[in-house]
Amino acid sequence: MARFHLTPRGALIAFVVLSTAAIAQMVWWIIFMARLVDEKVDLAAQYGADPATIEQLHDQEIGRQIMVGMEGIFFLVLILGGGWLIYRSLVKGEELKFHQQNFLMAVTHELKTPLASIKLYIDTLKSPKIPDEKKAGVLPRMREDLERLEKLVDNILEAGRFERSGYRLHRQAADLGRLAAERLEALGRIPRPKPLQVRKNLPPQVFVTADTEALSRAFDAVLENSLKYNDEDAVELAVTLESDGRMARLVIADNGIGLSRDNQTAIFDRFYRVGSELSRSHPGSGLGLYLAREIVQAHGGTITAESDGPGQGARFTITLKVEPGNEDDTAG
Amino acid sequence: MKTILLVEDDPNLADGLILNLEAEGYQVVHIANGNEAVEEFKRGNFDLVLLDIMLPGVDGLTICKRLRTEGYRIPILFITARSQTEEKIEGLVAGGDDYIIKPFDMAELLARIQGIFRRQAWLASGDDQLGEQYEFNGRRINFKTFEASGPGGTVPLTHKECMVMKYLVERTGEVVSRDQLLDAVWGYHTYPTNRTIDNFILKLRKVFEDDPKNPQYIETIRGVGYRFSKPQA
């Protein structure tokens, strides 16, 4: 037997139909009750009731009707509110399903493409038709593919760990500026197809209590995102750290493809990737920024993304609580 | 020398394919973006398109449909990470001739490419008993121009429809199994479902039969396959 499945559009139609029927029923009921009062008053008059009794009966019936009417309105609002909540959750469920399907497609593509490349390069190394000087370039390519696979598998496992039991942090005092500078340095060491220009203002001695490994992963995810979603000839990053002694704000601004208003919050959702997976312009799985948000939130902080719109670049802001007086410079 | 248009966005996979295909004697033109694929195809004179499905800009299925809609009959071989049966059928229905799933063996890819060229040569061959054009009882099919005419008028056939018809006509009076048809027309391993074959037969009946529901020329042999026969008019 086919399983009953209500699409968001179907749910909206059902909600509108039910609401209209409930409101129509309510209006009819009020009209019916009003007629009933008139009938009762007329009946009392026919049986010879005196005007004072009729007046009293009329007032009593009107009072009772107002009370019943108010109860009716209360239940109507309750039904409509409940219906709306069910509709919203159906829409959310469908959206999540869409993003999960997109995620599966993205992961399939991201896993299988480097695997195909490695397998092809093994065939290349074995081929007697390919000269040795051409085979020499194969090993670095295989290494790149393996590193890509490793990063993806790490992200998937990490996301699974969050889902199961959250993140167990091993906190210590960390110099946030130094940690960010280290991640930028590590990023600069990886060969990239485009030049990378970094402007940084990372004052020292801004301490937070953090799991440096986890926080490094969050920084890397944001930095990688800025590098990946960039169609300019050169990637420009401006990384600044500010502190008012209570909160530290690390801002990563890029000259990338920017974000629409809707995507500014959605990009941190699990599996979320902008657009359709079939015609994806940028590789990825939709887990990096989700992990970044989970890690920052596990530290009691926040992460936000802002953009003046598509093509205008993006600014990511990580806010963490400063630990005043902690000057343990073994951190980071 | 055969020229292949390779549409693949992954630089490592593309470079590996170029290296191996060139070593096999093919000339390869590489495009990394779906947006440019159709234009590049029109600029060049290609014998085969190796097409990734998930591409930046425009996806491979859309590119394939666009080429077919514009009347191009060049063989298209999909390279795809998607391995579900529905996804394979989607590629073949879009007009693809074959597909290979990542990760693949280079030897298998080369066998598929050679298979496509072999089948293409078979369809285009004019030196066999059928010739370029075949006529029966006022119906006509041209295996070079892919045009067919029958009671429904003159219609263009697809590459595959033409191949199915040629295979049946070459075996007039013989019962041809679905597996035989699948093997000859789509090549090994590329089997769509039997229903896909049935759809091709339905289309051919609409072209050649007076009453497609009571076929006189392309009969279904229950539980086996099909038979082309040429009754007296």
Image: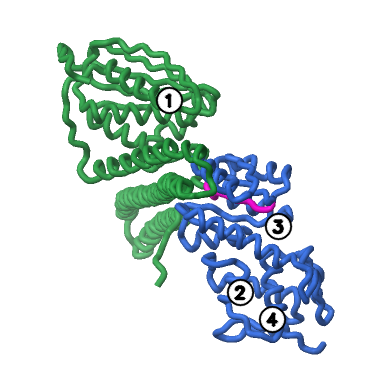
- The quarter of the image holding the C terminus of chain B is bottom right
Residue at 32%, 54% (x, y): give it. Answer: A61
**Colour-to-chain, blue:** B
- What residue did someone put label 2 on? B181
| Amino acid type shown at disc 3 | Arg
Q: Which mark is residue B171?
A: 4
User: How far apart are labels 3 and 1 at the CA level?
Assistant: 48 Å
User: How far apart are labels 1 and 2 at the CA level?
Assistant: 58 Å
Q: Do the residues under discs 4 and 2 have CB atoms within 8 angstroms?
A: no
- What residue did someone put label 3 on? B73
Residue at 78%, 70% (x, y): give it. Answer: B127
Q: In which quarter of the image is residue B211?
A: bottom right
Number of the front mark, 1 or 2: 2
* Image x and y of residue A155, in percent: 32, 40
User: How far apart are labels 4 and 3 at the CA level?
Assistant: 25 Å
SS label for mark 1: strand
The answer to whether tags 1 and 2 share a subunit is no
Q: How crowded is mark 3: few (under 14 residues within 10 Å), some or many (20 or more)?
A: some
User: How far apart are labels 1 and 4 at the CA level?
Assistant: 68 Å
Dot 4: chain letter = B
Residue at 39%, 61% (x, y): give it. Answer: A39
Of callouts 4 and 2, the N-terminal one: 4
Number of the front mark, 4 or 3: 4
Task: Specify the segment rendered in magenta.
Answer: B47-54
SS label for mark 3: loop
Q: Does residue A251 appear left or right of residue A299 in this picture? A: right
Residue at 30%, 49% (x, y): give it. Answer: A67
- What residue did someone put label 1 on? A306
Q: Does the magenta stretch include residue A315?
A: no
Number of the front mark, 3 or 1: 3
* Image x and y of residue B50, in percent: 59, 51
The answer to whether tags 2 and 3 share a subunit is yes
